Amino acid sequence: MSCASLRLFSTIRAMNTPATVALPCPCPGLDLLHVDADCVVLVKPSGIHSVPGLGADKQDSILSRLQAHDPAIFAVHRLDRDTSGVMVFGRHKAAISHLGKQFQARSIDKRYVALVGGDLQPDAGEINLAMRYAPEIKPRQVVDPVNGKPAQTLWRVLERRPGCTLVSLEPVTGRTHQLRVHLQAIGHAIVGDALYASPELQQASPRLCLHAVELAFEHPRSGQRLHFQAPEDFSSIFF
């Protein structure tokens, strides 16, 4: 895929269908964008797991908080613990299956924004670097052109700032830590990334400066294309 064929879609206001609210609201501590009988769309904060992990200290998660109100809810995708942004959850088996198939078919549009170190050039491009899990330095992933799985990321510069660049990102594939690894691999690690950034970039922000700003999918019941956004420009981070 060439840069000319970037599928990065422009910022669109959330087009929410009228909500049939079966989930008790408000759900404590969660920023809900949309709730109906089939799905829940919300803004995940940085610093909390999407789903429970291994160990007693990893049981608090967005999913467990939702399931406290509706045990049938299930996650159909994940964001890293330190990544914030828009997520969708299914509320019953048919909806979960429908949404899951959209992710598998890559028909769901996802867009992220990130603040990266340095002056990223040119104005847009793509990264095609195969990746794999590296058990010797877990939980990290590494670029591996021989044994890795194909991974593709499209990027576009939004704003150049002193010492850093705000970029729009579209992961064509969905490998674990893909955006973080790809940006580090081209010499522009994400600010605040405790796994992949230099000590200087880690110390520049109290959080990972990666945010899922936009999500678009077909509603599992109506088939209507829904778009949701949660703007973030990391304007509070200065170098």
Image (cartoon, rainbow, N blue to C red):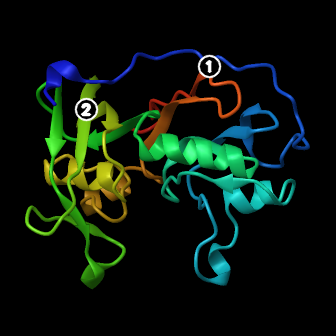
- Which element type, helix, strand or loop, lies under badge 1? loop
Disc number placed over residue 14 in the picture, else none: 1
From the viewer's perspective, is 169 left or right of 1? right
Disc number placed over residue 128 in the picture, else none: none
- Say above or below: 157 vs 38: above
Give the residue type that dot 2 points to: Trp
- Residue 121 picture quarter: top left
The quarter of the image holding the N terminus is top left
The quarter of the image holding the C terminus is top left
Give the residue type that dot 1 points to: Ala
Residue 231 pos. (x, y %): 53, 27
- Say above or below: 88 vs 140: above
Q: Residue furthest front?
A: 94
Crowding at mark 2 (Cα within 10 Å: few <14, some 14-19, many 20+): many
- Which element type, helix, strand or loop, lies under badge 2? strand
Residue 133 pos. (x, y %): 28, 71
The residue to which callout 2 is attached is: 155
From the viewer's perspective, is 148 left or right of 89? left
